Amino acid sequence: MLFFALILVAVGCYALAQKGVFSSNLTPELESLIVSKAKEWKVSPALVKAHAKVESNFNVMAKNPRDPSYGLLQVTPALAYDYGLILHHENLNQYEIDRIMNPKNNLNVACWFIRNLRIKYSFDVAIQMYNVGEAGYNKGVRNLTYLEKVKRYYDEYS
């Protein structure tokens, strides 16, 4: 009997872990900042949270050395440059990286980009373009796993 109870507890914990209950860095302060910036840029707070969950699990210090991309919403230097946050996007110094990783700046750039994508493209296409870029998507690059994860979290946060 105890064995079955332990199995049920383990299954329940696994299900909660899959929903991100145990592994989220989403503090009340960060959630408030996300909602504020999303509303400022007229994008869905649930969509911004969904992207942040998938991109960094709400880790404002996240770094991806392959891209490179930084922060909560994994903003690339090229995107930060396009937004006007930094003066160039190659050979960044620590000051420029810190500017990109700053949660307010990171959210401004990401929300601006999400808004622009949503104005021009369908929901599913905009989500994928956030991940692979407009140029990548137009060249045929797709990330259906990313799309499904963002949509799942969007539904959860809506």
Image (cartoon, helix red, strand yellow):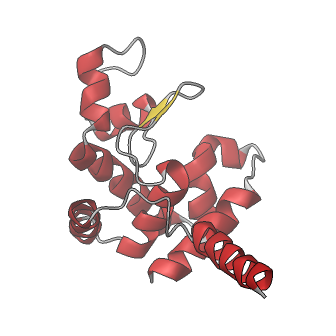
Residue 95, position as x, y percentages in the image: 23, 20
| Quadrant housing the N terminus | bottom right
Name the residue rendered at 67%, 42% in the picture. Answer: 136
Which quarter of the rendering shows the C terminus? Answer: bottom left
User: Residue at the spot x=26%, y=59% of the render?
Assistant: 30
Taking 70 as reference, is 56 above or below it? below
Residue located 48% across and 54% down the image? 57
Residue 153 placement (x, y as % from top left): 55, 72
In the displayed structure image, the side of residue 73 where residue 42 appears, left or right? left
Would you say 110 lies left or right of 33 here?
right
Q: Please state which of residues 10 and 62 is positioned toward the viewer in this rendering.
A: 10
Location of residue 45 by image quarter? bottom left
Q: Where is 152 relative to 33, above or below?
A: below
> Is residue 157 visible to the viewer in this orientation of the structure?
yes
Question: In this rendering, is residue 20 above or below 102?
Answer: below
Residue at screen point 75% across, 52% down: 142
Q: Position of residue 24 (x, y in %)?
A: 44, 60
Give the answer, above or below, for where 122 lies relative to 70.
Answer: below
